[in-house]
Image: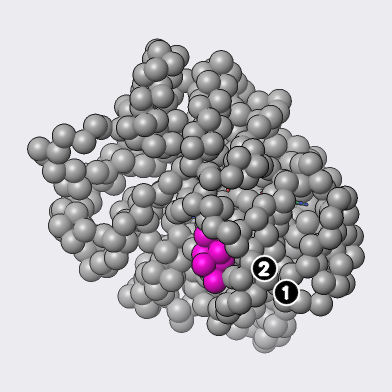
Amino acid sequence: MSDSGVKVLDAVVVGTGMAGLYMIKRLNDRGLNIQAIEAGSGVGGAWYWNRYPGCRADLPIIEYSYSFSKELEQEWDWSEVMAGQPEIERYLNHTADRFDLRKHIKFDTKVTDAIYNEDSNTWTVKTDQGDTYTCKYCIMATGCLNEPNYPGFKNADSFKGDIYHTAQWPREGVDLTGKRVAIVGCGSSGVQTIPELAKQAKELIAFQRSPVFTFPARNAPMNPKFLAQAKVDYSDIRERQRNSEMGVANYSGPRRPKDSNKPKKPRPSKKILDLTPEQRKQEVKDFGINALSAYVDPYFNPEANEIACDLYRETLKDILDDPQKAEALSPKNYPLHCKRPVIDTEYYSAFNQDNVSIVDLRVNPVEEVTPTGLRTNDAEYEFDVLVYATGFDAMTGTLKKLNIRGRDNQLLADRWKDGPRMYMGLQTVGFPNFFTTTGPGSPSVVSNVLHSIEQHVEWIDTCIDYLLENNIKTIEPTIEAEDAWVIHVDKAAKGSMMTAPTCNSWYLGSNIAGKPQGFMPYIAGTKTYREECDEVVAKGYEGFALTS
Ligand code: NAP
């Protein structure tokens, strides 16, 4: 602590989700003097805030768990294949306690400013609780999906009932028993919560703008034998994750008995165009709608994509009892694989319940919120509770909201006014010693994000060690390297369904009015990206300017 009450540190870590916790551990193990700052009252980040009913991992939890500690892998027993939010939050609390990380964290505190001082090569970080820290390294572990998006309907504040956002669900929970509930938004969060809300509510109205392609999670209680085998196999699983392009090993362990004569899922390398129409239908019959997510050609071939979309819509007619609901829930006008895959548990069967209805906002858009409900251009709806599942100002929202200033007092939000510019998703020009985990331009949200988090944390930690060992005062990208990386990221996305002309998604920023449009993640794959990151290091931090 300096005489002025300013705490002098090596590093400030902002956020204590999966990235922040691991970052604290690495830097603490290195003996650095650190402070982590957390807006919530507990650890967990996305898994702290998103506690809506039905919230769960969309990957098998064996794959979506920390790999950095063999002890943690062995001692934690997961109870479900796709663990739910409460269990993941418990796991992250256990991680914080097991590695004694809490002592570094200031909870219920929001960072307001992070300002670079050119004379001292330090960052001054201020909080809404009146704290001031100076540090050599400022690390934003604020996540990609942190800033909730509200739709900004006319007269939004006039509603007299309760309003919730899935990304800010109350810790004490919400009792919806016997209530008339409306939900706006049918993306991943809406799809997960609708079946749960439908169980409680007297009546549930889903206001849907874009129907999604969603595939059953096939969650199940964790088989103890499977878990025991996974514990034996963890190092192999992690190795396979590292050698994959999504950070996913597709570990199937001993779940399928060897003598099972159940048909195997279509191989991921299989092309839908290689099958006859009868064979395609037979595969959907054998494996359910999930068969349509397994073919490789719909990812890049519009003709294959359209065949898969048609079959998807056909299948919905069989799943849903009411043809009008099937029509409303049928995704149209954008390709499969354009948005982040949505994984559900009994989503469509919820719409077969009599208490669940759907309003197609493509046909009848919202006009305004009223004191008792919502008015669309053809009807007025009354309800007691309004739930927004309307997503996030993704990837850049939080960073652009803060007063982050680099060299020459430049505001990060100004530098990114036409879209984020980063080198490898790790650093941006003009902001020395300022790092982001899973930033724009890295695989982050188009991979097993925890796998990508661990890779970034390790890269940043190794980089800081290198700087300290070699008495290097600052690191930041060169403008040439950053420009080249932005082009490289754009090129990787070309030809993918994620950038198809009819595709709108938060990857592109198109879910937020006025946000610059551009594909933000890097889709070349985690293995490719890791090799590129390692090569940069091997070449003495190529593309970065280092000053002594
Ligand atoms: P989202 O995918 O952006 O979905 C938001 C939904 O709200 C969409 O249906 C969107 O419609 C609708 N919406 C937004 N503004 C609207 C408006 N003005 N009027 C009407 N509808 C509006 O957000 P999300 O569901 O929260 O998911 C975001 C991401 O979080 C996911 O892609 C995933 O990466 C992550 N997530 C992960 C999990 C998990 O791991 N289990 C769970 C939940 C979320 P349009 O599509 O027409 O814009």
How many marks do you count on the picture? Answer: 2
The secondary element bearing badge 2 is classed as strand
Residue labelled with disc 2: 181
Q: Is residue 67 left or right of residue 459?
A: left
The reply to whether the magenta stretch includes residue 297 is no
Q: Quadrant of residue 501?
A: top right
Can residue 224 be seen here? The reply is yes
Disc 2 or 1, which lies upstream in sequence?
2
Dominant SS of magenta comes to helix
Could you say which disc has been placed on residue 384 in the image? 1
Q: What residue is at 58 percent from the left and 18 percent from the top?
A: 302
State yes or no: discs 2 and 1 in contact (Cβ < 8 Å).
yes
Q: Is residue 110 left or right of residue 237?
A: right
The reply to whether residue 415 is in sight is no
Toward the viewer: 336 or 499? 336
Closer to the camera in the image, 137 or 200: 200
Magenta residues, start to end: 195-200
Q: Position of residue 542 (x, y in %)?
A: 53, 34
Disc 2 and disc 1: Cα gap in Å?
6 Å
The answer to which image quadrant residue 389 occupies is bottom right
Q: Quadrant of the N terminus?
A: bottom right
